Amino acid sequence: MKFLDEAKVYIKSGSGGAGAVSFRREKFIEFGGPDGGDGGRGGDVWVETVNGLNTLIDFRFQQHFKATIGTHGMGRNRTGANGEHVTLKVPVGTQIFEEDQETLICDLTEEGQRYCLARGGNGGFGNAHFKTSVNQAPDWANPGLEGEEKTIWLRLKLIADAGLVGLPNAGKSTFLAAVTRARPKIANYPFTTLHPNLGVATIDEREFILADIPGLIEGAHEGVGIGDRFLGHVERTRVLLHLVSAQEENVGKAYKTVKHELRAYSDEIGDKPEIVALSQIDILDKATLTKKTKELAKACGSTPYQISAATGMGMTEVLRALRDIIVEANAEANILEKPAKALKVRHRDIIADEDEAND
């Protein structure tokens, strides 16, 4: 399955059905009166997050979504049927933007969340609705209201607890493959990773999700290399694992290059909790390892971990450090923000609105 994290979609809700102009005509009933029914309501366009999706590739093959119109009213006071709803199935972590790509409509961060993107038009009143004591035979009815139509953008930001960042060939994909069951492409040339990869790491019977994004190079925020278009996938993470390859001539400069690109993209990402590790240390002798560790410590302001995914050195310590930060951040979020509870309340309100509309 190909990875796609952005898609442009056209949506249109259904128009309401027109009201009917009808009069009761039966033998032996002298004054039958109007009996035109109301039109049905048009269908809505909804978006819903579902489990099992991690890409927007489905929207490459279908970009137009239209709900059906409401059925017109009929004689004998028969109301037309409501139009059928259309639901866009998206992965957890999808954001919906207006056509300008800047105005956020909704941010769906939990499985099962639903949001109404376009309401269907109300059905028109039939002539029976306009009967009064002074006008007992109205010969007109209302047309149904037009549905809403607009173009929206879907943008996926993967939900992960920790993100892997670094220069190309820093060992990010190798690290992911070593600690999870993910099988990213690994090769000895730059930009082997062309799209984000996810994996579930386990340490001391606790699991957390790792996200590996393509490597950053100097000028990535200006579009150099693959650019910074995939950095959005680590915006939601609790912590970043910044890998610096021991093969770099100047490990301090390598660290500062990536750090600059992170800050150029977003201060929020640049200020995230960070664990720095010197990777691929199995290729160095003891003296060179000590020298490069000191250089990296001076650049990042803390003692970096020393790891090798090939031999397993230092991997357990890094995973435990990531786990501790994630657990602490999740605990603070639950105490201070309670985001999940608020989202569930809004979700129930949305579902209630939908049920009322169907009634």
Image: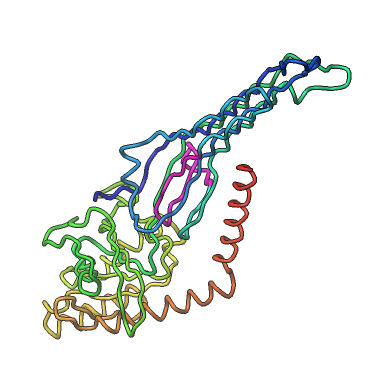
- The residue depicted at 62 percent of the width and 52 percent of the height is 352
Does the rendering let one see residue 106?
Answer: yes
Identify the residue at horizontal 11%, vertical 62% (top origin): 188
What is the image's colouring?
rainbow
Q: Residue at x 35, y 41 (%)?
A: 59
Instruction: Write down the region rendered in magenta.
Output: 85-105
Q: How many marks?
A: 0
Instruction: Tell me the quarter of the image containing the C terminus.
Output: top right
Task: Locate residue 201, reporting x and y percent.
Answer: 30, 74
194 to 97, vertically: above or below = below
Q: Quadrant of residue 281?
A: bottom left
In the rendered image, is residue 225 in sight? no
Q: Nearer the viewer, residue 260 or 76?
A: 76
Image quadrant of residue 297? bottom left
Residue 29 x, y percent position in the rendering: 78, 17
Q: Nearer the viewer, residue 297 or 29?
A: 29
**Side of 260 relative to 83 (left or right):** left
Asked if residue 112 is among those painted magenta in the image, a careful observer would answer no
Relative to residue 326, is residue 69 depicted above or below? above
Q: How far across and how far down the image is residue 242, in percent?
A: 31, 69
The answer to whether residue 143 is left or right of residue 309 is right
Residue extending furthest toward the right: 134
Residue sitting nearer the eye, 318 or 11: 11
* Placement of 167 over or under 40, stated as above or below: below
* Residue 205 image point, x, y percent: 34, 83
Q: Is residue 89 magenta?
A: yes
- In the image, is 119 to the left or to the right of 160? right
Point 59% across, 46% down: residue: 354
Extreme residue toward the front, this view: 28
